[in-house]
Image (cartoon, rainbow, N blue to C red):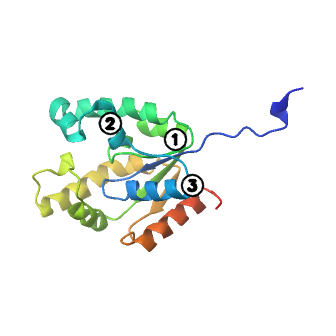
Amino acid sequence: MDMTDNKAEKRPLRIILIGYMGAGKTTVGKALSKELGIPFYDLDWYIESRMYKTVKQIFDEKGEDGFRKVERAMLHEVAEFENVIISCGGGTPCFFDNMDYMNAQGETVYLKAVPEVLHGHLVMGKSVRPLLLNKTPEEVDVFIREQLKLREPFYTKAKYTLDVSLMDNYEKIQLSVEKLRHLLNIEN
């Protein structure tokens, strides 16, 4: 007797968060991970743990092209995991066939924020962002706007889009997580 007829085949849950740096991918990913009880992977952290180097060190040693090759290989590794939430670096969807690959692997969500919000998050941010080093606040603002224009066509290929412009406190982060669960049809 063939049991596959009786059960719907359940695909592993893979939620892949994309968006510009500072949009809150890690914040939302961690909060959703805690709620769902499934592992969370920040792709940059995963790269650092596998390569035993910081993203900045990899950028410095290999340049952006070299980093993007490492990033792609690590994306292919982590996106094979089952029942995970992954947050990608802001540039990840824009190189190689990464966006098509992520769409094939799981539920992709573009966390969208306006440039002013991104700028505010990045100015407050504690982590080193190689692409923003040695830029004045005005240069950072121009850089964000220019990069968003270039990256938006890749980001909008995500299966879902969630506006996260208002995520400046715990309650608003939780609201974003609830909206994401609703968007992905994930029950409590």
The reply, left or right, for residue 165 in relation to residue 103 is left
On residue 14, the disc is none
In percent of width and height, residue 26 lies at: 39, 54
Residue 183 visible, this angle: yes
Residue 96 shows up from this direction: no
Q: Amino acid at mark 2?
A: Ser
Q: Residues within 10 Å of mark 2 (few under 14, many from 20)?
A: few
Q: Which residue type does callout 3 highlight?
A: Leu
Check the image and report above or below for 95 versus 89: above
Quadrant, the C terminus: bottom right
Depth-wise, is mark 3 or mark 1 nearer the camera? 3
Residue hosting label 2: 49
Where is residue 174 drawn, in percent x and y?
Answer: 48, 68
Badge 3 density bin: few <14, some 14–19, many ≥20, Cα 10 Å: some
Whole-number angstrom distance, CA of label 1 to CA of label 2:
25 Å
Q: Position of residue 19 (x, y in %)?
A: 38, 52
Q: Earlier in the sequence, mark 1 or mark 2?
A: 2
Disc 3 from disc 1: Cα separation: 21 Å
Quarter holding residue 112: bottom left
Assign a secondary structure to mark 2.
Answer: helix
**Discs 1/2, front:** 2
* Residue bearing mark 3: 36
Q: Is residue 89 left or right of residue 144?
A: right
At x 42% / y 36%, what residue is drawn? 98
Name the residue: 34% across, 65% down: 114
Look at 19% across and 29% down and name the residue there. 62
Residue position marked by numbered label 1 in the rendering? 103
